[in-house]
Amino acid sequence: MSLTVNQIRTKFLKYMESKGHVVVPSASLVPENDATTLFTGSGMQPMVPYLLGQPHPLGVRITDSQKSFRSQDIEEVGDNRHTTFFEMLGNWSFGDYFKEEQIRWMWEFLIDELKLDPNNFYITCFAGNESLGVKRDTFSAELWQKLFAQKGIDAKVSDTPESGMKDGEKIFYYNEKKNWWSRSGVPANMPEGEPGGPDSEMFYDFDATGQQKIHETSAWKDVPCHVNCDCGRFLEIGNNVFMQYKKVAGGFEELPQMNVDHGSGLERYAAALRNDPDVFNIDVFDEPKKMIERLSGKVYGESTEVTYAYRVVLDHIRAAVFLIGDGVLPGNKDQMYFVRRLLRRAVRFARNLGVHDNFTREVGASFIQTYKVEYTLLEEKRQVILDELEKEEMKFRKTLENGIKEFEKIADKNISGVDAFNLLQSFGFPIELTEELAKERNITVDRVSFDEEKKKHSEESRTASAGKFKGGLGGDGEMEVKYHTATHLLHEVLRQVLGDHVLQKGSNITSERLRFDFSHGEKMTDEQKKQVEDIVNKVIADDLPVHREEVSYDEARARGAIGVFDAKYGDTVSIYTVGRETGTRGGANLFSLEFCGGPHVEHTGVLGTFKITKEEAVSAGVRRIKAILS
Ligand code: SER
């Protein structure tokens, strides 16, 4: 029996703990205070501030298994390795250990602990680039070589992997297109201030014996096979990024600290341990597969179409369970639309398999059962998750049946943009669905004119709603700005009243109220709430001035800035102070000092009277306050 996903996760975290790392829980799939992306798509995303130099409250060695969702992969799901949701096992050194320890630990964990066959294990390293001023990573290559040698393997190093692998070659140098990692990819695409660095990637060979003929039967059969060739024989299972640079005007400069950012695919480890390149064969899908088999009468693997549909259904329901668990309900906007889309696709592909009755609740429950050991939140939110799955499924089934009837009426010829838009407008039939159905009939959909039609329509509705909304904080209206300043006051006062463990976990402002989420383990007492109100109102009565300053990141930290440091500010950060003098937070005449891009009022006196209307739990250890100004 191979190890289960839960067992591998535990082993990894324990291993990293034994090397001095603090295990932290996975961050939410919805990034807090990061407007650059809708979802958390890798383990390092929540770690960016610490990679840039902000001290992590739990130290310089951190490890976790991070829930990740890549919405851009929705349409890729169907092959043997793409999933939208996955877990990334990660460990980080924030200016502590570097290459030597990381590489030795990876070897020890994968080869000695998990017992991955070193003969099937391959490595890539950065070839170096003079124009970037970054040298070839011979250190990593030589260390990996030594480790292979300890197992009696003479690992040869290749400088020209793309021309095909030769016998005995195990370690390959690639340029920055393959062996450089940053959130925005290759060095040329990185914005100033973005951290990145060369990496050393780890691969598993699923066809070591050559019997499966993975390369020979793939779309890449006519090009030489190498670990990065995409034929599916080799799967990247993990990546060690040596994050030591920051992009600046004209090139790179060293970060204040040398970091390690390691991320590995938990599901890919599980697949490698089974020596089976199909990630949908790992244990977490066993039960859901049985359920679908029972409902559809079709067996996973019986034909290409059936396997494809199974994969979409399995992936999408799992992703939806986790997203709803993190508070994203199916809907029409932003993150919510993805949940809706995942569920609609799942229902639709299940329908292809012959499942016509509601089934997402049952399959969702199975995922909760499997994952609740690690993700207790799923168990806590079980009812909501299952109800939402079922509600959305029922709604969509109706749409699907009505829409298909309409579709049939127009599907005797290629579908025009207007007809496709009408299906969307009048029947809630998403364009992707129209396109999928059309493909099955061998007819086309005029996507260009559909897009034009949609644009025309949204411009009309935008014009209609202009004047109602402005940009910025969901409206730079006067009330929103007041609530924004009040949020700063509240944040500071909560720390004074409840303690320094209070950190902002989320903030949302409308013209009617502020909402502030913060870390705190218990319900606030009435006295505490009253005390918070009194202090905020005293600061308002004192009519303190509010100032914006641009200072270096180091200065902001030295002066005790709190709040969410947003990486996009780069070297120079924007801070807001509330007080008669600037200086250090907590100083006699400086009430509050926060990282913030604004906008704010000029004097606290304009805020009116502050009142807490609600104090409640959001999740374990996180409380939410709603408050109004009158
Ligand atoms: N940041 C790297 C990745 O996502 C390693 O964590 O692959």
Image: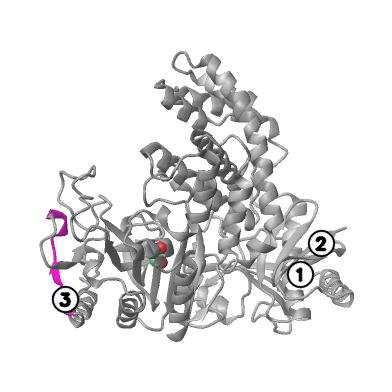
Read off the residue under disc 2.
627
Inspect the image, locate mark 2, and give the three-letter code of the amino acid beneath it.
Ala
Residue 456 sits inside the magenta stretch: no
User: Is residue 550 or residue 69 the one in the foreground?
Assistant: 69
Left or right of 593? Residue 252 is left
Read off the residue under disc 3.
153
Q: Residue at x 35, y 63 (%)?
A: 274
Q: Residue at x 18, y 47 (%)?
A: 216
Query: Any atom of ligand 1 within 8 Å of the CB at mark 3?
Result: no
Inspect the image, locate mark 3, and give the three-letter code of the amino acid beneath it.
Ile
Residue 309: where, in percent of width, then height? 45, 40
Span highlighted in magenta in the image: 152-163
Residue 490, numbered circle: 1
Q: How many residues crowd around disc 2 within 10 Å: few (fewer than 14), some, or many (20 or more)?
A: many
Labels 3 and 1: the sequence-earlier one:
3
Colour style of the rendered protein structure: one colour
For label 2, the SS is: strand
User: Is residue 99 or residue 13 the one in the foreground?
Assistant: 13
Q: Is residue 370 above or below residue 17?
A: above
Q: How many residues crowd around disc 3 within 10 Å: few (fewer than 14), some, or many (20 or more)?
A: some
Report which quarter residue 251 is drawn in.
bottom left
Residue 551: where, in percent of width, then height? 54, 72
Are the two marked residues, 3 and 2, in contact with CB atoms closer than 8 angstroms?
no
Q: Residue at x 56, y 82 (%)?
A: 558
Residue 225: where, in percent of width, then height? 17, 53
Left or right of 183? Residue 132 is left
Left or right of 539? Residue 321 is left
Mark 3 and mark 1: span between their CA atoms?
A: 61 Å
Quadrant of the rendered image holding ligand 1: bottom left
